[in-house]
Image (cartoon, rainbow, N blue to C red):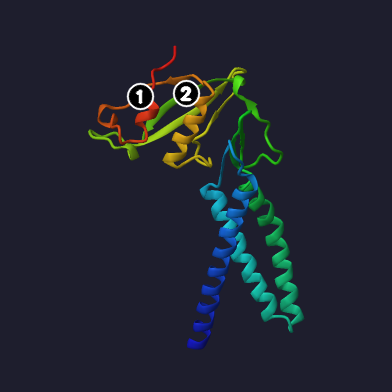
Amino acid sequence: MWNNISTAARNLLITTILSAVLWVLYILTQQWNYQKPEQVYLIGTNLSYGLSFLFFFLLILFVFSFIEHRFDPKKLRVSFILFSIFYLIMGPLTVLGFDNYLLLTQKGIQYNTFFNIEDSKVREWHEINHLELDYIINEEKEVYNQDDLRLLFKIRFDDGSSVELNNYNSPLYRRDQFLKIFTVLQKNDIPVKIKKPLPKQLKDPESYLYPLFSQKPTS
């Protein structure tokens, strides 16, 4: 019994390590493939990272299963059927997960959502009407810190459409990324509209919110 548990634990550890290595290589390859000078390329959400790791983890488990049952045709056939079902479901989801990206180039901005199979078109800078900054308070209390606010970072276009770059499955989620995107928008003379000022206790120059909301609102 203990030998079986020891073998299972060892196989699980090996699978986890191999999955992590493949996962990191996959992410680095995606970044290298799309990263170019003079542009900002952001990929990866919690959903896409989770799907890709699960894909590699289960893939390696199936490989071990094939090796273990290579002399047992019945079990091998069952493993292959289960693998085919897994691959048909997880393969497309993994690809879609990393087709969810935000790209800023010299020409404009391109935001491809998770379920958008074909690449969305690039919206040129002159098509953008303004950047709208706002926030939601997660919990009402007397004293706030920056983690109590959810930033709303919305691009509004001249045709009336808009995109919320800080949605719950957006590749834009790190604080330094907001500042990087904001700098690119400023360089391209995109007007900024601030819906409401920050609470007084958050007007701290050390906060990542400060340089965003310290802009003079455009009329």
Q: In the displayed structure, does residue 145 sit left or right of residue 130?
A: left
Residue 175 found in image quarter: top left
Quarter where residue 39 is shown: top right
Q: Is residue 119 left or right of residue 41?
A: right
Q: Nearer the viewer, residue 169 or 204?
A: 204
Which residue is pictured at 26% across the width and 27% down the height? 200
Residue that appears at 45% across and 42% down: 174
Provide residue 82's location: percent of width, then percent of height. Answer: 70, 66
* Residue at the image point whose x is 41% and y is 26% from the top: 134
User: Hey, what amino acid is under mark 1?
Assistant: Ser
Residue at the top extreme of this rendering: 219
Q: Residues within 10 Å of mark 1 (few under 14, many from 20)?
A: few
Residue 41 shows in this picture: yes
Q: Is residue 216 left or right of residue 69?
A: left
Q: Earlier in the sequence, mark 1 or mark 2?
A: 2
**The C terminus sits in image quarter:** top left
Q: Amino acid at mark 2?
A: Glu
